[in-house]
Image: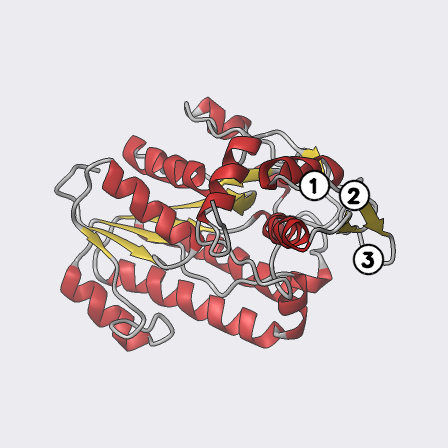
Amino acid sequence: MNHASKIFVAGHRGMVGSALVRCLNAQGFANVLTPSRAELDLLNQQAVYAYLQKEQPDYIFIAAAKVGGIHANNIYRADFLYQNLMIEANLIHGAHLAGVQRLMFLASSCIYPRDCAQPIEEDYLLTGPLEQTNEPYAIAKIAGIKLCESYNRQYGRQYVSVMPTNLYGPNDNYDLANSHVLPALIRKAHEAKQRGDQELVVWGSGKPMREFLYVDDLADACVYLMNQGYDGPLVNIGTGVDVTIKELAEIVMRVVGFAGKITFDASKPDGTPRKLLNVSRLKGLGWQASTDLEQGIRKAYEAAPFYQA
């Protein structure tokens, strides 16, 4: 990419898309397209095709998706499948019709088989059954990866897919009904401190292990790969390091300044015992994450809508 390149970030208002825009702006890319939903409905095929024909972007990052936690994924199965299929199909085929050669599709590590070996390698995709609760979302994301691969093979495009691990950072979702574990812990610890509680209740046993990547690191990796001209197979993006949920809760409590004790609610599910990405392919390409987990959680907390200095 050069600084005169026209770059379209689909989903620029979300946590990932907004991080991509921050990263591109910081690196001096001034011509970044960020149409609002009112200006461009990604579910409207004709509108997407017309927009891409008119704007003729040099590069596209697809960070737009319908997302949610386990509960939302499980309840709104048709919505997650249909909307994510439509968004990616409209953008990928529309990019091809408009002659766009370079595109990056952001998938999600939840699309790997439920019980695959750890750490998870890119080649494990489609080697076993998916987690049932988010299967529709996963199927849609797998379709997006296969669309990219197929346009490359049939038409010689350079459409790459990346697979981020669990993300956190500015513009995260802190709604306790459908947020992910880290933002939920940040909000719960903050509210416990405000109320003067003696304990922080954490779901499950605290033993499962999870990997977390600060969203600005993800954006940096995506822009790095695009700048390098990478056009190979799927790439995992993570830290390659995981922590237990108990350790995570302890870090969050330190950052928030809540001095109570942790109580585990064993009536709530633990989920998968471990989920860690193998990031050797990414490291081999010359990139690794730079934000320490505690430092990243502090940045995320200070960017949260309820934070008070």
* Residue where numbered disc 3 is placed: 268
**Image height of 30 relative to 150, above or below:** above
Is residue 72 visible from the viewing direction of this image? yes
Residue beneath disc 2: 262
Considering only order in the chain, which callout, 1 or 2, is on the residue closer to the N terminus?
A: 1
Given residues 14 and 183, the one toward you in this image is: 183
Q: Is residue 139 left or right of residue 248?
A: left
Callout 3: SS: loop
Neighbour tally class for label 2: few under 14, some 14-19, many 20 plus, Cα within 10 Å:
some
Q: Amino acid at mark 2?
A: Ile
The local secondary structure at tag 2 comes to strand
Q: Which residue is mark 1?
A: 249
Circle nearer the N terminus (3, 1): 1
Label 3 CA crowd tier, 10 Å (few <14, some 14–19, many 20+): few
Horizontal placement of 77 versus 214: left or right?
right
Q: Nearer the viewer, residue 19 or 136?
A: 19
Q: CA distance from mark 2 to mark 1?
A: 8 Å
Left or right position of 5 against 26: left
The first of marks 2 and 3 along the sequence is: 2
